[in-house]
Amino acid sequence: MMLSEKLQINHRHDGSRVKHLLFVLLMLASGFAGISYEVLYGRMLGNLIGDQFVVSAAILITFLLGIGIGSRYAWRLWRSLWLIEAMIGVYGAGFVFGASWLEGLLYATLPVLPAGLAGTVIACIALLLLPAFLIGCSVPLFAGYMSRISEKSEFSGVYGIYNIGAALTAILIEFVLLRWLGIHGAVLVFVGINLFIAAALRFGYPALRSDPPRVKVGSGGFYGWQALIPVSMASAVFQLFMVKLAEMILGPFRESFALVLSIVLLGIAVGSLLVRRFRISFQTVLLLALVGLLLLLAGLVPVTDLYASLYASAAGSYVALVLLKWLCLFVLMGIPCIAFGATIPALLGENSADVSKDSGYLLYLASMGNVAGFLLMVFLLHRYLDYGVQLLVIGACIACSMLLCRQRRLRHVVMSALLLLACGGAWASMWDEGLLYVSYTSFHAADDLRKARQNTVRVAAYKGYQDVFAINEVNGSPYFFINGYNSIPLNNPSEKVVGSLASIFSADTSQALVLGLGSGATASVVGQMFDHTDVVEINPVVRENLFRMKRWNFDIESNPAVNIVVDDAIHYVRAADKQYDLILNTVTTPLYFSSSKLYTRDFFQVVKQRLKGDGVYVTWLDARVGDRGVDIILNTVADSFRHCALLYIKSSYFLLLCSDQPISAHSLPGLQKGQPVYDNLLAVHGIPAEWLPYQLLTTDALALVADKTLPLNRADYPTLEFEMARLRQRGIPAFKSRLRRQMNLDDIRHVVSAQSPLFPGDLVWHTKTRLGDSSLTRRWRQLSVQAVPDFDVRYADAQGYYATALHDAHATPAALHEFGYLLMREGWYADAIAVFKYVLRQDPEHRYTAFNLGACYEYSGDLPAALRAYEEAGRVEPDDADVPYRIGRVYVKQGRFDDAQASLKHALALMGEKGRPDIYRYLAKAYEGVGNSVAAADARRMAEGK
């Protein structure tokens, strides 16, 4: 009797209940550990060499190839499963304890490797191929072992259990382990798991190792394998599609990727177990996948509407919000994932002569199909097709698999064709491609989503291998859209101000490095101030389409002093061999995973190595980081730099100027009258460049830290990323309160060497033009009034200087309108009227100018003139409900109550049934004016919300 037969009969040996249960747990643990290394190795390497596409793609393809090859030849290593698990763990330990050596290897110039990023990528592939191969061996060997332990064991059960562990890992890594232990600590947890599995297999199941399968080495492949290739390609394309869809709706966060990955792995597990339980055929699985695609095409709009309507209720609890996101994603992608996960178990069925070899062969084919699907998606589908059309291509691949089935029947082919046609119909009639370009923040409230869909016009969209860039028109303004997020308007001056301020506070203007190209506005300003500027941009699609934004970036591509490089900031800064006077970080908020690494102690230390002795590193923060997030950033800065100043861009958008030398402002030739940047800032945006240094708030931002015990933000333990993920409410009120207490005029006097005779009147007026009536503006006014007896005179003189500057610069109607609005807010109605009239002479239909002119007349008591101006505003903006409301208000003041009722009712009709309390209050006065007390009482109740 063969040993395998003895094992099946003798249940007290390796087939005992206890050992059976233990083996199932070992499989679960192996799945738990297997996927973790792909995620964690990716994060470790991303911290070292960045997240640029070529690196991410190399990591993914290496794992797919390695796992595929491991699956294909696993059966040859039957006796070594325990050793494979041990080697996986030992390799992980080597990654952790050899991290410093690894960094040196990746950036070393090896004679056998090409220089630059290409050599780094080859080194990554060489490092990851072995662990990927070892991980690929696990499932087929566990399936083979299980077939000897249990008479009823099948590959589908093993595959399901293994992927349950993997799905749990995807969630636990992102939401638990990394936040408790950091990246290295999480890797060591899985190292321990692998070593435990190895020991259990080595000493608990010796008989299994001694009985390898009796299969001829030269035996052929699995019958019907051809059908697996197209559906595996479809599976890879679908997974990448869902990652992008999650980014566009939920935001470009690591947690979005983790949620998608967990559903993909859970789908594999559920699909495998369903095949085991119900004996589902391969053809049925393919039809189920098409049904899932049909539901996704038809369900995107209602599911996103539901998500937006429930977001506010769930946002109060982090767990509830994550659960809402997961459930919405599962509704959209659950059925296709289950179907794709069931393909290999369904194809394998009960026809396997040897589970380990046949399952390994199919896993190998699936991995090769995944690689082909990945390449198809990134090089063709994503670049050239809309997302809805990509789903149709996925459906076509599934239909191809149906045609290649050896056991297909006519009804299966007909049903797949009908489902594919139904998908086309759903795409044409129900899919909303524009929904993906409204910015993920619009999905946080149903009303916001509705308005965004009404107000957003996708002017143009351009896609790269994995990134999406678009120029969206929102309420008439062009917005820079990248990967699910509408950034600031392209015609906004903020980014030009950032470039100007960074240059002003740089000790020298020889060499500059700008991290993040974006629209090019910031880098273009720096490029005009410095002798040479290097600009690093991670997204090739942004670089490719930079010429489309040249009217907003001084045509930066034509500047010979600017060198634009496509690379990750981390890799470029580590690999650079030069030093800079200024390094300016302009990449998007650290809220997004690709940017958060630039706020770590590790990165700050590398930046210091690239700065000259008096060099300045400039980065930024805003209210989205929260009060604790600000403390974490400042604590981390303090660990690397001796000095840090704080400047404002907006009321909750700040620059940090970090250096080992005190910060001071300098006059620059490129910011003088007659220069492009100076003239553009003043004429188009109403910003005198000579006043920009007044945006300094404090020279000692490090003193603003409230909690110095918070951990530093490190690459291994990105505490800022975790803090921002937990943050449920935007705002930094505690930080701003401390900032206002620390603000003082002496900082400005000390840093800004050339004092104006208007100071501090010009300081307060400039702050007023930039921030309006913010708490920072009020604080500067308070300090100035206390410090200077003739402040009011200096303030009025500063306003006069500003008016003259705008006139001499031939300011645009938009800039002049903003000036007039400021005058109106100050109560200087006569001056504001003069400015608004001047604007209307230049542009008779300039938006809101006639309306604000009417307001000035009304506030100054000239009601007939106010009425004429409001009527003109109604002609320009016929759908603006405020116009008939203001007209009705003037009529009430004139005693024309019948006319007032008509205008106020028109305002209510434009605004909606509930209207606005002030409209009902004036309507009540109009009713009282004609003696209609009942209607007046009803209007007052509406005004009170009753």
Image: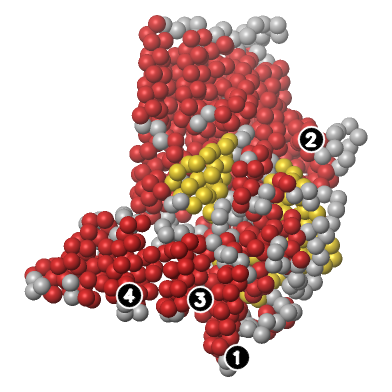
Q: Earlier in the sequence, mark 4 or mark 2?
A: 2
Q: Position of residue 113 (x, y in %)?
A: 86, 33
Q: Which label sits in the foreground, 3 or 4?
A: 4
Circle 1 — which element? loop
Q: Is residue 44 above or below residue 397?
A: below
Name the residue located 61 percent from the left edge and 35 percent from the top edge: 464
* Residue picked out by circle 1: 788
Report the amino acid beneath label 1: Val
Local crowd size for mark 3, using a 10 Å CA cut-off: few (<14), some (14–19), many (≥20):
some
Residue 925 seen by the camera: yes
Cβ–Cβ below 8 Å for labels 1 and 2? Answer: no
Q: Earlier in the sequence, mark 1 or mark 3?
A: 3
If the image is split into quadrants, where does the C terminus sit? bottom left
Q: Earlier in the sequence, mark 4 or mark 1?
A: 1
Cβ–Cβ below 8 Å for labels 1 and 3? Answer: no
Report the amino acid beneath label 3: Ser
Q: Which label sits in the foreground, 3 or 2?
A: 3
Q: CA distance from mark 4 to mark 1?
A: 34 Å
Q: Earlier in the sequence, mark 3 or mark 2?
A: 2
Number of marks in picture: 4
* Residue picked out by circle 2: 118
Circle 3 — which element? helix
Give whichever of 800, 629 is nearer the camera.
Answer: 800
Name the residue located 56 percent from the left edge and 21 percent from the top edge: 232
Q: CA distance from mark 3 to mark 2?
A: 51 Å
Report the amino acid beneath label 4: Glu
Q: Residue furthest bottom?
A: 789
Q: Residue furthest right?
A: 111
Local crowd size for mark 2, using a 10 Å CA cut-off: few (<14), some (14–19), many (≥20):
few
The quarter holding residue 532 reads: bottom right
* Residue picked out by circle 3: 775
Name the residue located 75 percent from the left edge and 71 percent from the top edge: 667
